[in-house]
Image: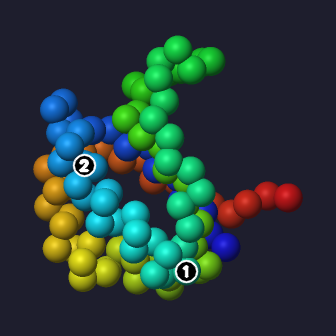
Amino acid sequence: MIYITQLIYIKDGQEATFNRFEEVAIPLIAKYNGRLLLRYRPTTDQIIAQTIETPYEIHLVEFSDEQDLAAFFQDEARKQMVHLKEQSIETVWLLKGTRLG
């Protein structure tokens, strides 16, 4: 398994646009042997320590392997909607790794 964690930062006023992209992208994860494990919108009162801006959302996703992850990113339906992602997202931190233990 491969795990992807994303810290997603949205442009001001673009939440609805981002959510429209997610309505397409999230259901496609399962098509490529993936699973959305966590989709979380943190609030500042939940942060214990912080030296970066609070992200709009945090995603934790697993895929069976690199090929499935690559296929997800190349999905035609996702690519047709990626303009919504580009319009709405300021930046994303993407951390890729494996589960320990």
Give the labeled residue for mark 1.
33
Q: Position of residue 40 (x, y in %)?
A: 50, 41
The correct choice, above or below, for 32 with respect to 6 in the image is: below
The correct choice, above or below, for 51 with respect to 37 in the image is: above
Residue sitting at x 24%, y 82%: 76
Residue sitting at x 24%, y 78%: 77
Q: Position of residue 85 (x, y in %)?
A: 22, 55
Name the kind of residue labelled 2 in the image. Answer: Phe
**Is 33 displayed left or right of 13 in the figure?**
right
Q: Quadrant of the N terminus?
A: bottom right
Q: Position of residue 59 (x, y in %)?
A: 49, 50
Residue sitting at x 56%, y 20%: 47
**Is 33 displayed left or right of 86 in the figure?**
right
Badge 1 element: loop
Q: Quadrant of the C terminus?
A: bottom right
Other residues around mark 1 within 10 Å, as few (<14) / some (14–19) / many (≥20): some
Q: Position of residue 14 (x, y in %)?
A: 18, 39
Q: Mark 1 or mark 2: name the one nearer the start of the chain.
A: 2
Other residues around mark 2 within 10 Å, as few (<14) / some (14–19) / many (≥20): many
Q: Nearer the viewer, residue 73 or 30?
A: 30
**Which label belongs to residue 51?**
none
Give the labeled residue for mark 2.
18
Name the kind of residue labelled 1 in the image. Answer: Asn
Q: Is residue 77 visible?
A: yes
Identify the residue at the far right of this view: 101
Q: Nearer the viewer, residue 65 or 36?
A: 36
Q: Is residue 96 visible?
A: no
The reply to whether dot 1 and dot 2 touch (C-beta < 8 Å) is no
Badge 2 element: helix
The correct choice, above or below, for 6 with respect to 72 in the image is: above
